[in-house]
């Protein structure tokens, strides 16, 4: 685990995001303050439309805030140009989505190798790193399998391997168990816990499922764009 665990790597101050729907202004986040420290596994909970995914997208620089400030790893994504933002994401962030987002015509190894195409690594080094990541998620025997040849749980583990292959500082997971059965969901959550506990990865996970949130070390509830008072809590460690 690198540097001090108390280091704040995500900080939001009075963060506000308002969407325009025709003539109607729809607030997604209202004056949110948040600190996420290195080594945390934070679950953002809330019903649909509560603002949790919006907060994740702002953290990744996929959208810009209407007001307030958001500093991630010492930088403000909202102030970056597209090229700088793409390079920053590839160097520092790993993404895990509900829909896996694997490319069907590529093997598991080729899917995991994709983020490394933007680095200066040789082809051999990229394959070695991708193989290491797949071994870490328990899919070392599925390197040459295509997504259609994998179960949903295996596809998500490939997606997690792709997220960690660049050794990111921060993993952002948006409903990572949403498309999985109970057994596969538990396996994926256990893997995220391992990445957090054994490898010191900082994780922010969006979920509406209390059981999934229990995998985290801290839970924050959002409702209508605001943190719900008295709902922040330390989560139990899953058995």
Image (cartoon, rainbow, N blue to C red):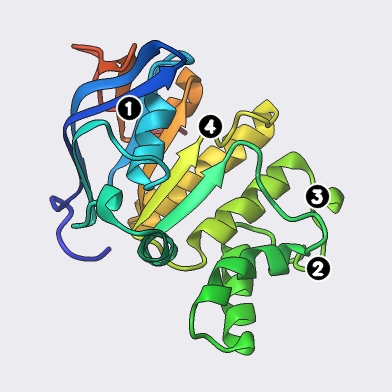
- Check if mark 1's residue and mark 2's residue have beta carbons within 8 Å: no
Taking 54 as reference, is 70 above or below it? below
Label 1 Cα neighbours within 10 Å, binned few <14 / some 14-19 / many ≥20: some
Pick whichever of labels 2 and 4 is earlier in the sequence. Answer: 2
Q: Residues within 10 Å of mark 2 (few under 14, many from 20)?
A: few
- 174 up-or-down from 37: above or below: above
Q: Residue at x 79, y 44 (%)?
A: 151
Quadrant hosting residue 30: top left
Tell me: 52 left or right of 102.
Answer: left
**182 above or below 122?**
above
Report if the CB atoms under discs 3 and 2 are less than 8 Å apart. no
Image coordinates for residue 124, horizontal then vertical, percent? 63, 88
Assign a secondary structure to mark 1: loop
Residue at 52% across, 66% down? 165
User: At numbered mark 3, what does the secondary structure look like: helix, strand or loop?
Assistant: loop
Q: Where, quadrant-wise, is the N terminus in this rendering?
A: bottom left
Name the mark nearer the viewer: 1 or 2: 2
Rounded to the nearest angstrom, the CA distance separating label 1 from label 2 is 37 Å
From the image, state whether disc 4 or disc 1 is nearer to you. Answer: 4
Of mark 4 and mark 1, the one earlier in the sequence is 4
Mark 1–mark 3 distance (CA, rounded to whole Å)? 31 Å
Residue placed farthest to the right in the image? 149
Confirm or deny contact between disc 3 and disc 4 (CB under 8 A).
no
Whole-number angstrom distance, CA of label 2 to CA of label 4? 27 Å
Q: Residues within 10 Å of mark 3 (few under 14, many from 20)?
A: some
Residue located beneath label 4 in the image: 175
Tag of residue 144: 2
Q: Nearer the viewer, residue 170 or 17?
A: 17
Q: Earlier in the sequence, mark 3 or mark 2?
A: 2
Q: Which residue is mark 1?
A: 235
């Amino acid at each position: 685990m690198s540097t001090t665990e108390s280091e704040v790597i995500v900080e939001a101050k009075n963060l506000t995001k308002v969407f325009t729907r025709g003539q109607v202004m729809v607030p997604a986040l209202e004056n949110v303050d948040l600190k996420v420290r290195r080594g945390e596994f934070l679950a953002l909970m809330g019903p649909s439309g509560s603002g949790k995914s919006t907060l994740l997208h702002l953290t990744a620089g996929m959208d810009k805030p209407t007001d307030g400030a958001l500093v991630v790893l010492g930088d403000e994504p909202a102030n970056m140009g597209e090229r700088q933002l793409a390079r920053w994401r590839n160097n520092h962030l790993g993404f895990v989505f509900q829909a896996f987002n694997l490319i069907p015509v590529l093997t598991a190894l080729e899917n995991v190798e994709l983020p490394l195409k933007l680095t200066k690594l040789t082809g051999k080094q990229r394959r070695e790193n991708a193989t290491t990541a797949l071994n870490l998620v328990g899919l070392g025997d599925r390197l040459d399998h295509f997504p259609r040849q994998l179960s949903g749980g295996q596809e998500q583990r490939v997606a997690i391997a792709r997220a960690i292959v660049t050794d990111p500082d921060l993993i952002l997971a948006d409903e990572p168990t949403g498309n999985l059965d109970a057994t596969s969901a538990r396996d994926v959550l256990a893997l995220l816990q391992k990445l957090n506990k054994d490898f010191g990865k900082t994780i922010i996970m969006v979920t509406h499922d209390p059981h999934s949130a229990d995998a985290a070390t801290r839970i924050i509830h959002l409702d209508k764009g605001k943190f719900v008072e008295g709902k922040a809590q330390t989560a139990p460690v899953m058995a």
